[in-house]
Amino acid sequence: MKLSELIVQDLVEVPLRAADKWQALSILAALPVRSGRYSAAVAPMIERALVERERSMSTGMEHGIAIPHAAVDGIDDLLAILALAPDGIPFEAVDKKPAQILVGLIYPRHKKLMHIKTLAEIARMLARADVRQRLLLCKTPAEAIAALRELDAARAP
């Protein structure tokens, strides 16, 4: 699945302002509730799952990317959340750089393996410097979605 098909406008946070990765995870967990995808009762479950996963091993990668992800009971569909933090958020990344592009993945526990292909697609797309640079220029969720569509279209065979 292409990143532009996975990310929808109401699940984009631009700019993300968080003091640390724990606050960022809390914001990511609240976004599906704020957008009406889930009831307020689900946000603590999502946040707890993201925090547990993060405590087991940092999801901070190289080049200012973090892909926090977690399996959650009681949901039916994979959700992807894009957050752009131009100022960066400390995320204990492999290269020690702060995360500026966060893609949160929340997936049903009973479909735990479904996220592997999705993680690979996200990593492949964000490995490109031009993609990262273009996303960090976006000032609104609509701009981020348009950029993803354009970048995916340019990559298509």
Image (cartoon, grey):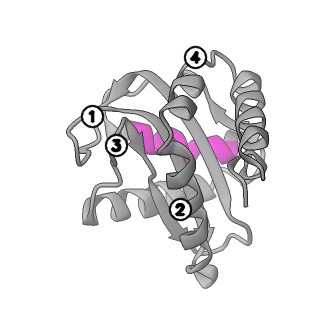
SS at badge 2: helix
Question: Does residue 93 appear left or right of residue 42 in this picture?
Answer: left
- The answer to which of marks 2 and 1 sits earlier in the sequence is 1
- The answer to which of marks 3 and 2 sits earlier in the sequence is 3
Judging by the rendered image, the residue that carries numbered circle 1 is 90
- The answer to which of marks 3 and 1 sits earlier in the sequence is 3
Q: Residues within 10 Å of mark 3 (few under 14, many from 20)?
A: some
Task: Give x and y (percent) for residue 72.
Answer: 56, 70
Q: Nearer the viewer, residue 10 or 38?
A: 10
Q: Nearer the viewer, residue 37 or 1?
A: 1
In this rendering, is residue 101 above or below 138? below
In the rendered structure, find residue 137 and report the number of the disc placed on it.
Answer: 4
Question: Does residue 151 appear left or right of residue 121 in this picture?
Answer: right
Task: Give x and y (percent) for residue 75.
Answer: 69, 70
Q: Residues within 10 Å of mark 1 (few under 14, many from 20)?
A: many
In this rendering, is residue 68 above or below 143? below
Task: Give x and y (percent) for residue 145.
Answer: 74, 33
Residue lying at 68% horizontally and 46% vertically, measured from the top left: 33
Judging by the rendered image, the residue that carries numbered circle 2 is 119
In this rendering, is residue 137 above or below 78? above
